[in-house]
Amino acid sequence: MSALQAWGWRVAALALVVVSAWTLAQEGELGWGRKPWQNLQTTVAELAQPSWLKLWF
């Protein structure tokens, strides 16, 4: 593979990363997580009461 081909592959890969990041940013999906603390609190609250109590009462 020549240096020009290697450079072309790098540019193509960079363009793919930029387009992917741009698309995720436009959809609001680009971030450090999806509210991890809120999800943890919700999970703890759901697990605090056993599910068989919901079925029984």
Image: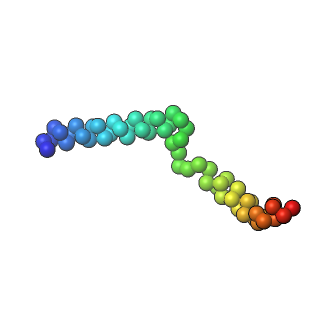
Query: Which residue is located at x 21 percent, y 39 percent?
Result: 7
Query: Which residue is located at x 24 percent, y 40 percent?
Result: 9
In the rendered image, the residue lying farthest to the left is 2
Nearer to us in this view, 41 or 46: 46
Query: Which residue is located at x 31 percent, y 41 percent?
Result: 13
**Quarter location, residue 12:** top left
**Where does the image place residue 47, in percent across and percent down from the top left?**
72, 63
- Position of the C terminus, as image quadrant, is bottom right
In the rendered image, the residue lying farthest to the right is 57
**Where does the image place residue 23, in percent across and percent down from the top left?**
46, 35
- Position of the N terminus, as image quadrant, is top left
**Quarter location, residue 44:** bottom right
Q: How is the image coloured?
A: rainbow
**Quarter location, residue 17:** top left
20 sits left or right of 40 in the view: left
Residue 2, compared with residue 52, is above or below; it is above
Residue 41, compared with residue 24, is above or below; it is below
In the rendered image, the residue lying farthest to the top is 26
Nearer to us in this view, 10 or 55: 55
50 sits left or right of 17 in the view: right
**Where does the image place residue 35, in percent across and percent down from the top left?**
62, 50
